[in-house]
Image (cartoon, rainbow, N blue to C red):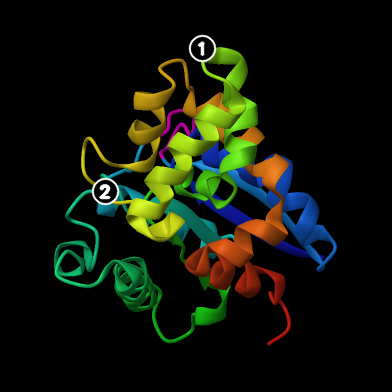
Amino acid sequence: MNELVVIAEGPTEQAFVRDQLAGHLVIHGTSAWAVLSGKSRKQGGVRKWEGAKADIVRTLKEGRYCSTMIDYYAMPEDWPGRIDAKELQWRERAAHVERAVSGEINAALGDRFNPKFFIPYVQLHEFEALTFSDVNALAAVVAPVSKMTPDRLASLFLQVLEDAGHPEAIDDGWETCPSRRISRIVGAFRKSLHGPIVTRRIGLDVLRDKCDHFSSWLARLENIGAE
């Protein structure tokens, strides 16, 4: 059984890996779990690059596959490729950062390192973008903490999606990132509680169908050990 450590941004991503991704990957011969970035690995949030780099290098030196699940939104600008990515089309931003990150890790570990063991993933633009893959599921989960009906909520969420054109295109502005768009509609929305519940209800098949960059990452994880 292959072993994969996902260095996660926070409790939301950690719950997604634990409750949804791990069960899927074990069918493909990989045991996966998530840890939070940092020496204590108890607090979430995107670390500055040098700290995150140390986490990645340490994990790879343990002889395991390593991935990341880090939001493009609010990523510190010292991450490789982050500043340049601002000038790119939204579809290209995360992949650009991932390539730059891979380059840094490959250089840090040297010629003896097999690059297949590192599979970076940067979420466009925030984990909560995935919940817009099915606005009816999103509405159903948050309706109990809202004063609106599920139908009304679904209509409002659909408008956000249609304005952006794609779940992963919902952008990285302070007021327009996916989680704040949801919170403006449902003030009681809690990322770490409701987000993973919504994605479980939606299911990985729909997530990968609606979210291209996420789909590419999932496919790479499914093929761990195949090379």
Where, by quadrant of the figure, is residue 38 drawn?
Answer: top left
Please name whichever residue, 141 or 127, is drawn nearer the observer in this view of the structure: 141
- For the C terminus, the image quarter is bottom right
Residue carrying label 2: 172
| Residue 123 visible in the shown view | no
Residue carrying label 1: 147
Residue 6 in the figure: left or right of residue 202: left
| Secondary structure of the residue carrying numbered label 1 | loop
| Secondary structure of the residue carrying numbered label 2 | loop
Where, by quadrant of the figure, is residue 103 drawn?
Answer: bottom left
Taken as a whole, is the magenta stretch helix, strand or loop?
A: loop
Identify the residue at image location x=21%, y=62%: 82
Question: Above or below — where is 203 with respect to 220?
Answer: above
Q: Is residue 23 magenta?
A: no
- Residue 218, disc: none
Q: Which mark is in front, 1 or 2? A: 1
Residue 43 in the figure: left or right of residue 205: left
Please name whichever residue, 59 or 162, is drawn nearer the observer in this view of the structure: 162
> Circle 2: is it few (<14), some (14-19), or many (20+) Cα within 10 Å?
some
Q: Is residue 39 magenta?
A: yes
> Circle 1: is it few (<14), some (14-19), or many (20+) Cα within 10 Å?
few
Q: Give the range drawn in magenta.
A: 38-44
The amino acid on which the numbered mark 1 sits, given as a three-letter code, is: Lys
- Tell me where residue 198 appears, x and y as whole percent: 63, 37
